[in-house]
Image: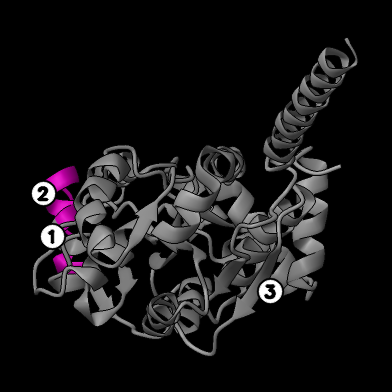
Amino acid sequence: MRRHLMVLLGLLVGLSMVAAACGSDDDDAGGSGASDGADRPAIVVGAQDFGESKVLAEIYAQAFEAEGWDASVQELAGYRDILLGAFESGDVNFSAEYAASLLEYLNGDDKTEATGDVEETVGFLDGYLADNDLVALAAAPGVDTNAFVITRETADELGIESLSDLADKGGDLVLGAPSDCETNAFCLPGLESTYGLDLSANFVSIDDGPSRVSALEAGEIDIAVVFSSDSTIVAKDLVLLEDDQNLLAADNVLPVVSTEIDEAYGSELRDLADKISAKLTTEVLLDLNDQFDNDKRDAADIAKDWLEEEGLVS
């Protein structure tokens, strides 16, 4: 009888140890959720050497930190070539890039694959990214591309708000743009092929961006090419003409992540990044750049305030 009792007690102890072990596994699994970055690589967000990139890097990094992940910003003393080198070396593994420009950089040919359609452009880009162990997440609606602006006075006087309006009412206006505008598919040739607007006889080559804006204000030109999220648009109260027929390159903000980080964080990172990106419109980019360039605010502070205002962090 005593022997049977000891055997029974032994079985009960063994079963309790198994149950405890199973419970421990469940706890560990629960701890690897969205708020726990343990056992996963740190996220290092690369920032290129201009204000918009620095602010965007802070936005994504701070949101990741608020989720409980190990995330930081790495500022790089250069542009796309330096950033891609940092991806290759593993110094960074996430960055807010630009769809069309990244595609044209990576394709390595004298051909234009980017279009005005962001889904089509990212579709072309995906293969090049895969070759570099990179993955594109969902693109933001916000675009930072070469675009056309006019003064508020001209817009009100002629009733021009879009490139279609410009084609109907602005055929005699003078365009100031970089010298490659004459051959760039997204400039003079594109205006003619997409909008039926031939400004080749009214074209003035001005390669320096600030000089184009000065010429516009002085009345030396009537239309200037600037980046669509340039803070000068806000500072000078310029009118950004709507590209209502999708001529301009789809340089939408596009988060790019290493395959290692994508696999380690999976849908958790994708969902959070997509949620952030969905709120980054061109108007938001203009406001963020206005704060950085004109108000001289720190990128981290701008990002913190925007994330809180949008309810993306508490």
Instruction: Please report contact status of discs 2 and 3: CB closer than 8 Å, yes or no.
Output: no
Q: Position of residue 112 (x, y in %)?
A: 13, 63
The residues bearing labels 3 and 1 have C-alpha atoms spaced at a distance of 32 Å
Q: State the quadrant of the C terminus.
A: top right
Residue extending farthest top: 1
Which residue is at 25% across, 52% downward?
A: 126
Say which mark, if any, is on residue 293: 3
Residue 260 in sight here: yes
Task: Name which residue type carries label 3.
Answer: Asp
Q: Which residue is drawn at 76% across and 29% down?
A: 23
Q: Do the residues labelled 1 and 2 touch (CB within 8 Å)?
A: yes
Mark 2 element type:
helix
Residue 193 circle label = 2
Q: Is residue 28 above or below residue 282?
A: above
Give the CA distance from mark 1 to mark 2: 6 Å
Dot 2 or dot 3, earlier in sequence: 2
Q: In this view, does 199 lie to the left or right of 26?
A: left
Amino acid at pointer 1: Pro
**What distance separates the C-alpha of mark 2 from that of mark 3?**
35 Å
Q: What residue is shown with label 1?
A: 189
Read off the magenta span: 190-202
Q: Is residue 188 above or below residue 278?
A: below
Along the viewing direction, whichever of 71 and 236 lies nearer the viewer: 71
Task: Look at the image and tell me in which quarter the N terminus lies.
Answer: top right
Local crowd size for mark 2, using a 10 Å CA cut-off: few (<14), some (14–19), many (≥20): few
